[in-house]
Amino acid sequence: MAAIITARKLTYSYEKGGTPEDQNAADRVNNDNNGVGDVGGEVIHAALRGKDAAGDDIHAALRGVNIEIQHGEFVAVLGHNGSGKSTLARHFNAMLRPSSGVVTVAGFDAADDKNAIEIRRRVGMVFQNPDNQIVASVVEEDVAFAPENLGVEPDEIRRRVDDALKLVGMYEYRTHAPHLLSGGQKQRVAIAGALAMQPECIVFDEPTAMLDPRGREDVINIIRRLRGERGVTVVLITHHMEETIDCDRIFVMSDGEIVKSGAPGEIFSEVELLRSVGLDVPDTVLLMSELNRAGWSLPLDALTVDEAAEAISLALASV
Ligand SMILES: Nc1ncnc2c1ncn2[C@@H]1O[C@H](COP(=O)(O)OP(=O)(O)OP(=O)(O)O)[C@@H](O)[C@H]1O
Ligand SMILES: [Mg+2]
């Protein structure tokens, strides 16, 4: 498997009082850092915690992140509020440029503006708020929006739109008005819009955060199918551990750094670490890991109460 996304010593900094959309500050630091060269991450961090040339405070939202995501992988990024997840995600489709370090997407250097379009063709994004992602007043027109902008042939657009809407289960709603749909349905339309670009990778930034349980389940099931049936590389950003259970790898972020990565089973057993970085560990996982500490060997991926009860009774039966 080849890597689709790599980040090496990725640092992203901003001026205090700026907004995440305000990139000028980061650009300024970027220029300053060019003189620093390839120094160790710690030196860069120290510099970024200090002042810039104009004497303004500089803060880093990402501090020396190293990550490599392979084609076809399903990875999750877990982390508390403000840990840097969205900032990292925005580097994956060239919405942000690194202050220092190197990001490549499908072989393109993400620091070079000339590559932004090529990168965005290959990496789609789905955000938290479905309302902010719908641009047209009819579902199918919304899904067609991006391929139309790219100049895709009308027949091909029709095929892509129908296919994407069928995949997310919204084909029957193709002529409906998006604003009359539920949050979960809108989010499914937003996913169809990303799919219609035929991207190699889709980055989901907390796609279920604003949805009810039903909408959440629908969206998570679609994400699984994308990976399973379409081979799309998936990056899922979330604070919900239970959404990450069947991904290939989990990256845990805290304070702009990746503090741990591994397979779900490995990460789920680090209950203390997860709590120490402010993540909610499901009660079932907590119970199972306490029991395992007391000598049991229970699966940590029995997440629902029923699954946990079944795993425990199975273990009891074999005593
Ligand atoms: N340009 C900027 N100006 C000011 N603050 C910024 C800027 N960019 C990032 N930040 C700050 O950097 C930190 C990381 O932000 P980011 O949005 O990446 O976190 P997150 O993990 O996605 O959080 P959440 O779970 O709330 O979505 C936050 O404290 C945020 O306020
Ligand atoms: Mg975020």
Image (cartoon, rainbow, N blue to C red):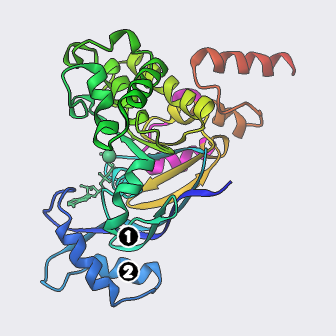
Q: Is 277 contained in the magenta span?
A: yes
The Cα atoms of the two marked residues, 2 and 1, are separated by: 8 Å
- For the residue marked with disc 1, what is the amino acid? Thr
Query: Which residue is at a point 33% across and 56% down the rendered structure image?
Result: 87
In the image, the segment drawn in magenta is: 268-284
SS at badge 1: strand
- For the residue marked with disc 2, what is the amino acid? Ile
Note whether 161 is above or below 102 in the view shown: above
Label 1: few (<14), some (14–19) or many (≥20) C-alpha neighbours in 10 Å? many
SS at badge 2: helix
In the image, residue 179 lies at what x, y percent?
19, 18
In the image, residue 190 lies at what x, y percent?
33, 30
Q: Nearer the viewer, residue 258 or 76?
A: 76
Query: Which residue is at a point 33% across and 90% down the rendered structure image?
Result: 35
In the image, residue 285 lies at what x, y percent?
59, 32
Query: Which residue is at a point 27% across and 82% down the rendered structure image?
Result: 31
Q: Is mark 1 within 8 Å of ligand 1?
A: no
